[in-house]
Amino acid sequence: MKLLIGFGNLKKNSPNGIEFRDGKRTLYFHGQAVAHGQLAGEFAPRDYFYNLRFLDDFPPIPHWAFGDAWTQRLKIGRPKRDNEDELSGWVYFGDEDSKAVYVITRAWDIYPVRAVELGEPFSRPPWVHAPLPPLFNEPLNIPLRLIVARAVLAALDDNWPYDQWQLVTSLVEREHVPQVLASDVAITYGFRLRGVPMDLRQALCEFQGLRQ
């Protein structure tokens, strides 16, 4: 069996993920143990996931998912203006019946990040409520939240078509995981996610109940 997907989360009650036992790690896929960690020594789960040690622990895995591997078509509906500072609209996941509301909110606070690419001395990254599919509402699927947020903002700039289906995937190639799970979402992406810590690696830990 050639494993193409690893799940970068604790196994717990899921058929997919990493099990910690007797100082060793085992990767499960569809309920089957498919690989054993290659790093020597024991790791606290919180430090292990925050520092993305699973990438080195299971080096043959080319693609990673978090909580859920969602590959489907996505459609962004045109927004309506709720007030002077807020837009909202529908995100459709797979079909017309599976939908949720996205919200883009203008930020007035000065986020202390240089925004040279924006031509501004300091950036004011907007807040985005990026929903997940109603039937697959897995908080750990941070990559899918990022896809939705980037899509709704790109659509405002005519860089993503409204009302057209686009195929997306929450799978992340191994070499891109450190960038996707950025330590500061505003610096990396130019927006902030409602309900998600700014440090996406912290989010990966907190959504699993792993705290310092």
Image (spheres, grey):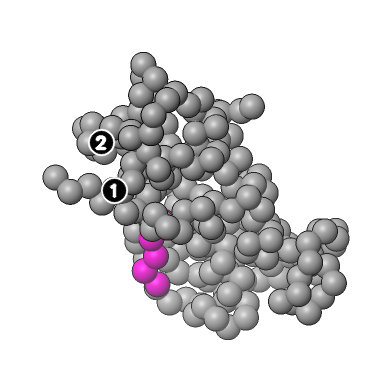
Does the CB distance between marks 2 and 1 fall below 8 Å? yes
Label 2: few (<14), some (14–19) or many (≥20) C-alpha neighbours in 10 Å = some
Pinpoint residue 63: horizontal percent, then vertical percent. 34, 53
Q: Main secondary structure of the magenta part?
A: strand
Question: In the image, which disc is placed on residue 35?
Answer: 2
Task: State which quadrant residue 157 falls in.
Answer: bottom right
Which kind of residue does numbered mark 1 sit on?
Answer: Pro
Q: Is residue 198 visible?
A: yes
Task: Give the Cα separation between the discs numbered 2 and 1.
Answer: 9 Å
In the picture, measured across the screen, residue 123 lies left or right of residue 181, that is right
23 relative to 164, above or below: above
Q: Quadrant of the N terminus?
A: top left
User: Which residue is at 55% across, 81% downward?
Assistant: 159
129 relative to 90, above or below: above
Which kind of residue does numbered mark 2 sit on?
Answer: Ala
Q: Quadrant of the C terminus?
A: top right
Front residue of 63 and 152: 63
Q: Is residue 103 magenta?
A: no
